[in-house]
Image (cartoon, rainbow, N blue to C red):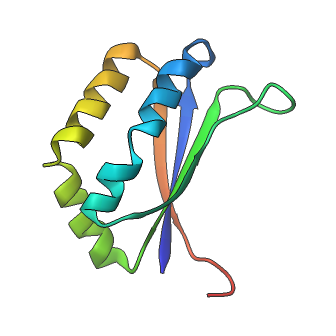
Amino acid sequence: MITLCIHYQIDHHKWADFERYARNWPEPIRRCGGELIGYFLPTKLAGSTNRALALIRFRDLTAYEQYREALMKDSDAIENVKQADASGCILVENRSFLRQIPE
């Protein structure tokens, strides 16, 4: 198993837009072959208020590549990205893969 970790830098004035974006992902992610662990938004309690995180699990790299291909054709996914782009809630998006220990 591998876990895709998406690090977002978000506009802290547009939390509601990013939260809407995050809430729209579970079904397209599942439908396209990913296992969503969750989206994590910052709090005002401590730390940075402009960072968010998403974790999505896949069987292997091939499963991730199939997921990406399916996601680019999924109408709900396409619309969700368009809405986020229009709102400007996401400033930077970085992806990395993690391996869980122990597996």
Give the quadrant of residue 46: top right
Q: Against 47, is 94 above or below? A: below
Q: Residue at x 23, y 39 (%)?
A: 76
Give the quadrant of residue 102: bottom right
Q: Against 100, is 68 above or below? A: above
Q: Residue at x 54, y 37 (%)?
A: 8
Residue 84 drawn at (x, y percent): 37, 25
The outermost residue toward the right is 45
Q: Against 66, is 29 above or below? A: above
Figure disc tally: 0
Q: Is residue 45 left or right of residue 71?
A: right
Q: Is residue 48 visible?
A: yes
Q: Residue at x 23, y 31 (%)?
A: 79
Residue 10 drawn at (x, y percent): 55, 26
The outermost residue toward the left is 73
The outermost residue toward the front is 27
Give the quadrant of residue 99: bottom right
Q: Is residue 58 left or right of residue 40?
A: left
Q: Is residue 91 visible?
A: no
Q: Against 31, is 25 above or below? A: above
The outermost residue toward the bottom is 103
Residue 4 drawn at (x, y percent): 47, 62
Q: Residue at x 17, y 47 (%)?
A: 74
Residue 25 drawn at (x, y percent): 39, 44
Q: Quadrant of the C terminus?
A: bottom right
